[in-house]
Amino acid sequence: MRLLFRVLMAASVACLAILGTTSSAKAYPQWQFTSGTTRCNQCHFNPAGGGLLRGYGRDAAGEDLATFNGNGGFLHGGVELPDWIAVGGDFRLALAAQDVGGPVATEPKLFPMQADVYTRVAMGESFSLSVTGGLRGQIRRVGDPLATGSYVAGNSNYLVSREHFVMWQPSAQGWYARAGRFFAPFGLRFAEHIMFVRRDLGFNLLQESYNLSGGYIANEWELHLTAFGPDLVQKLGARESGASAYYERRLFDETASIAAQAKFATVDGTSRIIGGVVARYFLAPAKVMFLGEANIVNQQFNGPAAQNQFVGAAGLTFLPWNSLMFTAMGERLQSSIAVKDTATNAATALLNWFPYPHVEIQWVGRLQMPTAQDTAKTVLLQVHYYL
């Protein structure tokens, strides 16, 4: 296993050397407050952030959030699109290795993690249509077990649309409503789907649901309410139905936020109620941001059986420069609070570098530590390019 990780580290250094002239991608909670923005939709068209960038976000990517400045516009500014249409894309190539403590070490795998193209068409001043289409990259073998209550994608489902929705939003601030397939606003919304607060709360890879969502966005606060159901078209992700709510309030001259969230979901006679809090605080003089999320999950099974679970994460991000950030997170997943030795802890380290606009290089190291079981070790290197 030592040889395996030496190979991976050598590959990481080689990739950094070769790609030392590249950079930038944004869909991370670390950018809120640290980049001079208070709302995620200042940079993104989506009300809760992520996905296609607005002009403001592209300008910031080119001028402020890269080691070496450049043009953050579509195709590096080579093509100027009409105001009524916006196009973008995300492409990720990943090299991963994992040791779960078994007798046979997992070989490093090089695979296309993401290949998505985004299109947004404005229909007048208030309405728009957004569609994301791309390839379903996967490292898991077809036939491997998936979470209970989830659809199992077939071999032919390599072309997918993670998001497609219509939206009414007269302005970036104020009321909005949208309907279609997307993730309901909830939690810290890390880009890394392996984290417990995404993977185990219904926001894992390709688990976007069909939603009817709406809310209100202001500089000081925002509210998002969502009713959701399963994807009956592509049959991807969870089969849960339910509703969620997320309310966030900005504090301390808009350098911090505290949020309350709730979610109810049911499938096949099993239901769960999630209640949680989310916090961010940016200490500007030290260039350090605190991020935390804690959730209590009441899981109700068929019959009288029920259990309370805990899912949470907390850590710090250090940004010595706007284009370089290091994040260290501690995580905990306890499947039953009342039962001893049912917890799995994890430690995740993320290093993100944005040398030039349009490219990000990320290194991830993760230790997942179940009680009384071997520690799983994961190393991931990815190169991310966006149009």
Image (cartoon, helix red, strand yellow):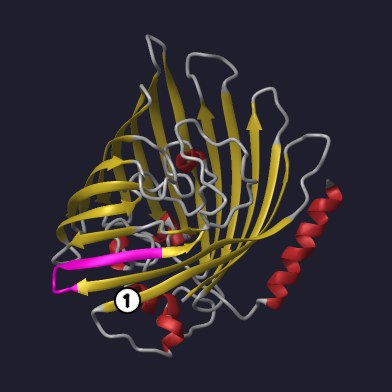
The residue shown at (77%, 46%) is 106
**Residue 104, how many percent across, how many down?**
82, 39
Closer to the camera in the image, 279 or 127: 127
- Percent of width and height locating residue 2: 84, 48
Q: Is residue 71 visible?
A: no
Between residues 155 and 129, which one lies in front from this camera angle?
Answer: 155
Residue 237 position in % (x across, y down): 44, 43
Q: Is residue 127 magenta?
A: yes
Decide: few, some or many residues near mark 1? Use Cα within 10 Å; few <14, some 14-19, many ≥20: many
The answer to which quarter of the image holds residue 350 is: bottom right
Range of residues picked out in magenta = 123-132
Residue 268 lies, with reference to residue 25, above or below; the image says above
Judging depth in this view, the residue of 120 and 261 nearest the camera is 120
User: In the picture provided, is 214 more to the left or to the right than 18?
Assistant: left
Residue ID at (53%, 57%) = 158
Q: Secondary structure at mark 1?
A: strand
Q: Residue furthest right?
A: 3
What is the quadrant of residue 13 in the picture?
bottom right
Residue 175 lies left or right of residue 231; in this view the side is: left
- In this picture, is 326 found above or below 377? below
Q: Is residue 385 inside the magenta stretch?
A: no
Residue 239 drawn at (x, y percent): 39, 37
Q: Which residue is mark 1?
A: 86
Q: Tell me which corner region of the image, top left, top right, bottom left or bottom right, holds residue 218.
A: bottom left
The answer to which of 278 and 54 lies nearer the viewer is 54
